[in-house]
Image: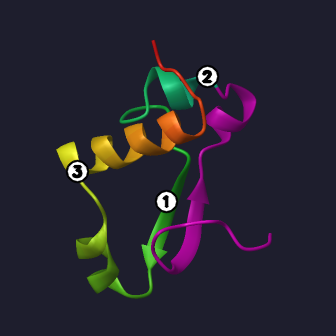
Amino acid sequence: MGPVPSPISGEVVEINDAVKSNPSLANDDPYGAGWIAKIKPSNPAEISSLLKGTEAAEKLGAIAKEKGISCS
C-alpha cells in the first residue's frame, strides 16, 4: 500500500473491511461502524495540532464553499 493522506504521520495498523464493502457506513455512522482506518501515530504531539469542534467545522465549511459544495 502506498502513502495515505493524513494530517498526522504514522502507520496504518487496521482497515475497516466493512466500509470497503459498504462505503455509505462512513457517512451514516462515522463515529461507530463507519470508521475507515486506525493509525498508530509516530509523533503523538501532532495530534494536538489537529483542528477540533467549531474551528474544524468553520474551516471545512470555508473549503466546501470555495469548491462550490453544498451540504443541505
Tell me the distance, in whole angstroms, between the alpha carbons under discs 1 and 2: 18 Å
Quickly name the residue at label 2: 24
- Residue range (magenta): 1-23
Q: Which mark is residue 55?
A: 3
Compared to residue 52, the image places residue 61 above or below, namely above
Q: Position of residue 4 (x, y in %)?
A: 67, 67
- The secondary structure type at the circle numbered 3 is helix
The first of marks 3 and 1 along the sequence is: 1
- Amino acid type shown at disc 3: Glu
CA gap, disc 3 to disc 1?
A: 24 Å
Q: Position of residue 47 (x, y in %)?
A: 30, 73
Dot 1 falls on a residue whose secondary structure is strand
Colour approach in the figure:
rainbow
Please report the residue visible at 23 percent of the width from the left and 53 percent of the height from the top: 52
- Find disc 1 in the rendering and name its residue: 38
Is residue 53 rendered to the left or right of residue 31?
A: left
